[in-house]
Image (cartoon, rainbow, N blue to C red):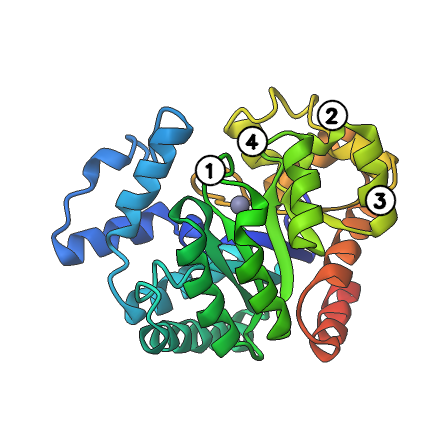
Amino acid sequence: MSYRAMPKVELHLHLEGGAPPAFIRGLAKEKNIDISGIFDEQGGYLYRDFEHFLQVYEAACTTLTGPEEFRRLTLAVLEESAAHGVVYSETFVSPDFCGGGDVGAWREYLAAMVEAADEAERTMGITLKGIVTCIRHMGPEQAKTAAKCAAETKGDFIVGYGMAGAEMVGRPGDFAYSFDMAREAGLRITCHAGEWGGPDMVADTIRDLAPERIGHGINAIKDLALVDQIAEQGIVLEVCPGSNVFLNAVPSWEAHPIAKLRDRGVKVTVSTDDPPFFHTTMTDEFDMLARTFGWEEEVLSELNQTALDAAFCDDKTKEAVAKRLAAG
Ligand SMILES: [Zn+2]
């Protein structure tokens, strides 16, 4: 059976990373940008390895030239998510890609995304919130600029602050200033760690940035004392198994630690990360979890509930989403 129709909550989705290839091809054509080399014969994204993935991702992003492109992108991404049963989603957005860190320009991009999110909520029954992310490999100074943009625009849509980008660049503590700034502004905190980095990276991230959620965090499994600490502190992992398998962060679905982490008491959730790039969807994630670990509807519902509890939106939104989950 397929879990396509089951309502779902997703916490870890990069907005540009969700861009359907057909949408990007269309934009490239409109703008006369030749990026035909990044697609395979079936029209999907084509790349060799993680490094090349980052290049293809950036090439795709060259078509997203202004707020209007981000409005259309947001709609295209939400259409895809809604088609796979997602009723609530949080997406990573970066001021570095939307106005280059200028607060005024960022506000314009943001307004375009909010317009699309409002439309999607009305027409597709999916709610979207945004988490501003700094890009780790752009360094701590740039991260402060992102945090400032986040703090200035905290509100109904922007609810969190986090960090994405190349995990092995720099140390978490280098970014403490921007995370403190975001926290003081009332934003909730998540951070990518333990996808490529080992348990030390996860431990340092918890110590220095105090996130409520960790993006991936799967390599914590290599240190069971750390796993117990994560469970005790109630830190939620945004696990993206399809992404991990596709990028070879783990060798196979069978070898993925999500079940072991859950068995040891860690709050785990499931997301797609950059779905078309990793040839996955929320339906695929749920179906593969069911097939690989024998997780039936009860466990999958628990994942949704954990994700909703850990969502950064306000209680009123959570109540509305809970009703949509219960309606099935
Ligand atoms: Zn990610």
- Return the residue at label 2: 222
- Return the residue at label 1: 169
- Return the residue at label 3: 231
How far across and down, in percent of the image, does residue 43 sit?
31, 38
Q: How far apart are marks 4 and 2 (CA)?
A: 12 Å
Q: Is mark 3 on a helix, strand or loop?
A: helix
Q: How far apart are marks 3 and 4 (CA)?
A: 21 Å
* Residue type for callout 2: Lys
Whether the residue under disc 3 has CB within 8 Å of ligand 1:
no
Residue at 46% in and 44% down: 165
Q: Is mark 1 on a helix, strand or loop?
A: loop
Estimate how packed mark 3 is, as few (under 14), some (14 to 19) or many (20 or more) residues with alpha carbons within 10 Å.
some
Front of the two marks 2 and 1: 1
Q: Which sits earlier in the primary sequence, circle 2 or circle 1?
A: 1
Q: What element carries label 4?
A: loop
Q: Is residue 144 above or below residue 298?
A: below
Estimate how packed mark 1 is, as few (under 14), some (14 to 19) or many (20 or more) residues with alpha carbons within 10 Å.
few
How many marks the image carries: the answer is 4
How far across and down, in percent of the image, does residue 290 sit?
74, 35
* Residue type for callout 4: Trp
For the residues labelled 4 and 2, say whether their Cβ atoms are less than 8 Å apart: no
Q: Distance between the residues labelled 2 and 1?
A: 21 Å
